[in-house]
Amino acid sequence: MRIHHLNCISTCPLGGRLMDNRSAGILERGELACHCLLVETADSLVLVDTGFGLRDVAAPRDRLSAYFLLLVDPAFREEMTAIRQVERLGFDPRDVRHILLTHLDFDHAGGLDDFPHARVHLLGRECEYAEQQRTWLDRQRFRPQQWGTRAQWRTYAPDAGESWMGFECVRGLEGLPPELLMVPLPGHTHGHAGIAIRHAMGWRLLAGDAYFYHQEMDPDVPWCTPGLRFYQWMMEKDRGARLANQERLRRLRRERGDEVELFCSHDPAEFERLSGRPAGVPVAPRAAR
Ligand SMILES: [Zn+2]
């Protein structure tokens, strides 16, 4: 299992330093990553989350809500999309046979349409709530314009599976090796999940938007920037579940931190540590295969 870390277009939220704690001031915009993974399995490529895609770059106003465009102002650069970074790695995007989604928010599902041959795996509850479009905010965050591959989605019931490292209902995925697991982590959305990947050195767990800032996972003194605390409060669908899952993730880091490398979708410092390059730089090109 070779794992590549891809930032599929940074967002630049209002609030600057209040969000990311590393921009110079609060009047400039911050920078958050959209941390995706490309996993090489024995017989296919698997993409975990998709960030923003080519169509978002080409026509953001057709695909995304004016509200979030104003709030997070994505840095639309085609070279940062998942499909272009897959190509830079020397792969044929058609070899991406599977996509695992943490959830359906606009900044995770935007690249789905760039991989029309991939089967998409996600929790059924996420589909149901996203499609219902119940609230104004749901209509801004869940964008049916990004769901052109809807016919290839494979959904899973959230109440089946086994326990794994203190988490329940964890399951393997159809047509994928047992080294890839979906770990339900509801709260941010109702069908939100983390993705665990076993590799030679242990596990990696992409916790999606279960938390946003690395210091939230500090077992002793958890802390989050005020801007990201507000953003998580604004976006949460189930506060009790979200906070309980954060507590379980902190326990995982405390008790199994040497076996499981835990990281979230949007923290640029985590992305830079795991990828070994600045968040605004695409993956290094590899000679064509
Ligand atoms: Zn997100």
Image: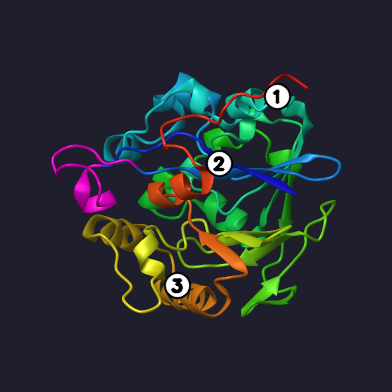
Mark 3 sits near ligand 1, with its Cβ under 8 Å away: no
**Which comes sooner in the sequence, label 2 or label 3?**
2
- Circle 3 residue: 246
Distance, label 2 to label 1, CA atoms, is 23 Å
- Circle 1 residue: 90
Visible residue check, residue 38: yes
Judge left or right: residue 149 versus residue 77.
right
- The residue range painted magenta reads 14-31
Camera-near label (2 vs 3) is 3
Q: Is residue 18 magenta?
A: yes
Quarter location, residue 45: top right
Residue type for callout 2: Ala
Crowding near the residue tagged with mark 1, few <14, some 14–19, many ≥20 C-alpha atoms within 10 Å? some
| Main secondary-structure element of the magenta-colored stretch | loop
**Which comes sooner in the sequence, label 2 or label 1?**
1
- Circle 2 residue: 109
Crowding near the residue tagged with mark 3, few <14, some 14–19, many ≥20 C-alpha atoms within 10 Å? some
Residue type for callout 1: Gly
* Residue at the image point whose x is 75% and y is 73% from the top: 161
